[in-house]
Image (tube, rainbow, N blue to C red):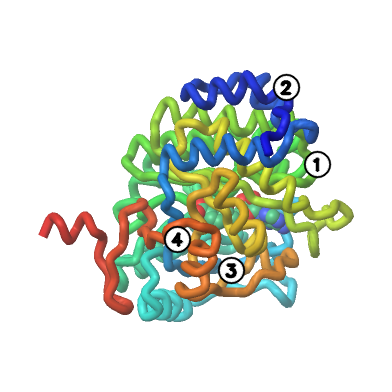
Amino acid sequence: MIRAITPSLEPIREKVEAGERLSAAEAESLWDPAIDLHELGELANLVRERKNGNFAYYNINTHLNPTNVCVYRCTFCAFRADLREARGYVMSDEQILARGREAVEAGSTEMHIVGGLHHQKDYDWYLNIIRILHQAYPALHLKAWTPVEINWFCHLTKRSIREILAELKEAGLGSLPGGGAEIFHPEVRDRICEHKADTREWFAVHRTAHELGLRSNATMLYGHIENAYHRTDHLLRLRELQDETGGFQTFIPLAFHPENTRLSHIPKPSPAMSLRTMAISRLVLDNFDHMKAYWIMLGIGTAQAALAYGADDLDGTVRHELIYHDAGATTPEILSVNDITQLIREAGREPVERDTLYHRVVRDGTAWRTAEAIQAG
Ligand code: V47
């Protein structure tokens, strides 16, 4: 049966099919619930398959949050703790190295490291985490510290973003994760995370990272107090920097989890809202290669469905995730490779294990190399 097309989607369909860029007004119009979600998904899928064929990527990764003690009080965060709170913690070097060992023994190719801004820890403590992990486990890619931490390090040391990033890179930093982006528009940002790195600083860190040859990711936290205009503005700002540097690898829309936060009165975004957000992100961010459906926060069912709504990546098997689980995520703590590849196959896609930089991984148990490295001999 051929369904009648929603009239306002038709010009956008023509542009997407022709590979043309959507304007700000066109992008914003897509949030209207009158725009059929499944037709939107079909369009996003067209772009997804153009860029990534039938492949769906995953990696084997581990999270490390060295401390949850944080000077900031973002309203959406359930992870942070005060210095003297019983649930506040700081990991020792031994615990951090043990986490590295566990990661490598489990075959992880990546460690995702973010944490609180601890009042009593200096920059060298954070730098040392990268240094000791890289020295002990050089093959483990360290995707670490968002612009929020980098900006804090600049504040502590009175040094520039460039100097800090260059030093971290020298110590073993592999890339930057996409966090700390939240919503860039000041109407929202000033109400949910007023004191931490602002939008100008977030972009300055990513621009500098790209100039230094570090790749990075970008996120958007949706489903709280923002509206369609703010989400569109967020995507367009990212598209603009990507035009300039090409340094972003993947975009990750993050569904707000309200439990244990100061915004606990707001309901979680629905699966339909999450699929719409994924599809619109895929359509607007025409210069991003990858869209990640982070199963931890979307839930496994929605993440699987998102593979038909623009997403080509499920993130990883993920060990030791705390930020979402503290905020009430009911997803498992970890997925096995069998689980994740089965989810992908059931969605009709072909699973591909990747490293952080989207090289295909060839593995023999916990030992692994990229296909590129094997070809180069
Ligand atoms: O910046 C915090 C978000 C982000 C909540 O780069 C919350 O590959 C929902 O950035 N409900 C950190 N979201 C996580 C992140 C990320 C995740 C997966 C992959 C990558 C990547 C990056 O988590 C924060 C904030 O936007 N967040 N609290 C909450 N209650």
Give the Cα distance between marks 2 and 3: 43 Å
Q: Is residue 156 visible?
A: no
Judged from the image, the secondary structure of the residue bearing numbered disc 4 is: strand
Residue type at mark 4 is: Tyr
Q: Residue at x 49, y 77 (%)?
A: 92
Residue 234, relative to residue 361: is it above or below? above
Please report whichever mark, 2 or 4, sits nearer to the chain's N-terminal start.
2
- Residue position marked by numbered label 2 in the rendering: 7
Answer with the quadrant where ligand 1 appears in the image.
bottom right
Judged from the image, the secondary structure of the residue bearing numbered disc 2 is: helix
Q: Residue at x 34, y 46 (%)?
A: 166
Q: Residue at x 80, y 64 (%)?
A: 260
Respond yes or no on whether mark 3 lies under 8 Å from ligand 1. no
Residue type at mark 3 is: Glu
Per the rendering, the mark at residue 321 is 3
Please report whichever mark, 4 or 1, sits nearer to the chain's N-terminal start.
4
Residue type at mark 2 is: Pro
Q: Is the C terminus in the top left, top right, bottom left or bottom right quadrant?
A: bottom left
- Residue position marked by numbered label 4 in the rendering: 58
- The percent coordinates of residue 343 (x first, y second) are 54, 66
Name the residue nearer the viewer: 176 or 48: 48
Closer to the observer: label 3 or label 4?
A: 4
Q: Residue at x 37, y 58 (%)?
A: 354
Per the rendering, the mark at residue 225 is 1
- The percent coordinates of residue 371 (x first, y second) are 23, 58
Please report whichever mark, 3 or 4, sits nearer to the chain's N-terminal start.
4
Give the Cα distance between marks 2 and 4: 37 Å
Name the residue nearer the viewer: 85 or 159: 85
